[in-house]
DNA sequence: AAATTTTACAACCGCGCAACC
DNA sequence: AGGTTGCGCGGTTGTAAAATT
């Protein structure tokens, strides 16, 4: 049985997102969360497949994403984790919550790969070279560098028998991490409507959009929730880059 | 200044996994 | 138990911008 590609339906738009589409997607998710990516575009009034919406949200539109300007520390973490784990971008991204796996992957291919190779070549030219450092950069190495960032040293300590942490040591994606941590926080604080499963699944949204919110000019053709439910599940946010769309 | 090459990054695609029925 | 579905991951592509010739 062949899986039907989610974008197979003709009429679904592909390619670069327009500001209008972004506005629709952000407004919808702020209000209702992403309860089902496949169905979401219908309700949000978008001619996109769910997968495309998810990608746009996760990699570009969701709040608390840092873009560009990588710090030295961030780059060290990426290089060292990549050396140990290989192309486990989601795992690496989980340790840099404000970065997306896609952006980290891009940054690696555009600049860090070269730098990492240089570092390896420099270390090879020193007396204590190892065979493993000659491996292709995408291959995980069994030898961790001496200058591990603290996050990685912790992992190493957790698995004293194995110098390379297993993937199960990084068992959450960045989104899952948000959801878990925040829903725990929410559950601690009260037993009210915030602990409902829907809210839990989208809890990072509420965390990011504090206080009153309303964009009446955005119309949703259909909504999976009643108006009353909607009032119970959204808060607002006032990030400059989004607010300017509505001025 | 124009043409060409390189770089950066947004977006697409296919696959595997897990949950559900 | 096996089929179906949705989600997330990693590889890859397309293209705009920047750099170079």
Image: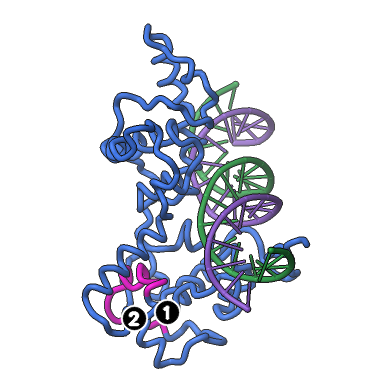
Chain colours: A blue, B purple, C green
- How many other residues sit within 10 Å of disc 1, few (<14), some (14-19) or many (≥20)? many
| Residue A31 circle label | 1
In the image, residue A202 lies in the stretch drawn in magenta: yes
What residue would you read off at disc 2? A213
**Percent x, y of residue A242:** 39, 68
Q: Is residue A101 left or right of residue A160?
A: right
Image quadrant occupied by the C terminus of chain A:
bottom left
Residue C21, by quadrant, is top right
Residue drawn at 45 percent across, 16 percent down: A121
Q: Is residue A88 above or below residue A227?
A: above
Q: Are marks 2 and 1 on the same chain?
A: yes
Residue located at (37% from left, 31% from top): A163
Residue A178 x, y percent position in the rendering:
35, 62
Residue stretch rendered in magenta on the structure: A200-215
Q: Considering only vertical position in the picture, is A47 above or below A169?
A: below
Residue at 51% over, 66% down: A19
Foreground mark, 2 or 1, reads 1
Q: Position of residue A66 (x, y in %)?
A: 36, 52
Q: Is the residue under label 1 in contact with that under label 2 (CB below 8 Å)?
A: yes
| Chain ID, mark 2 | A
Q: Relative to the observer, which residue lies in front, A138 or C4?
A: C4
Which of pointers 2 and 1 lies earlier in the amino acid sequence?
1
Q: Residue furthest top?
A: A127
């Amino acid at each position: 049985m062949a899986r039907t590609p989610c974008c197979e339906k003709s009429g679904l738009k592909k390619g670069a997102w327009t500001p209008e589409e972004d506005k629709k997607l952000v407004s919808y998710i702020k209000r209702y969360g992403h309860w089902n990516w496949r169905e979401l575009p219908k309700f949000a009034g978008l001619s996109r497949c769910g997968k495309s919406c998810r990608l746009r949200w996760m990699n570009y539109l969701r709040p608390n994403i840092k873009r560009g300007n990588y710090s030295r520390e961030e780059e060290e973490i990426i290089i060292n984790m990549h050396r140990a784990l290989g192309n486990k971008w989601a795992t690496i991204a989980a340790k840099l919550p404000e970065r997306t796996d896609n952006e980290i992957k891009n940054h690696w291919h555009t600049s860090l790969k070269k730098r990492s190779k240089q570092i390896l070549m420099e270390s090879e030219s020193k007396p204590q070279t190892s065979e493993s450092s000659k491996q292709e950069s995408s291959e995980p190495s069994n030898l961790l560098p001496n200058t591990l960032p603290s996050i990685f040293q912790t992992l190493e300590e957790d698995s004293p028998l194995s110098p390379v942490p297993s993937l199960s040591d990084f068992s959450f994606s960045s989104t899952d991490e948000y959801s878990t941590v925040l829903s725990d926080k929410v559950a601690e604080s009260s037993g009210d409507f915030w602990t409902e499963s829907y809210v839990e699944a989208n809890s990072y949204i509420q965390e990011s959009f504090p206080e009153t919110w309303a964009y009446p000019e955005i119309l949703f053709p259909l909504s999976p929730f009643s108006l009353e439910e909607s009032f119970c599940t959204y808060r607002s946010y006032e990030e400059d880059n989004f607010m300017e769309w509505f001025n």
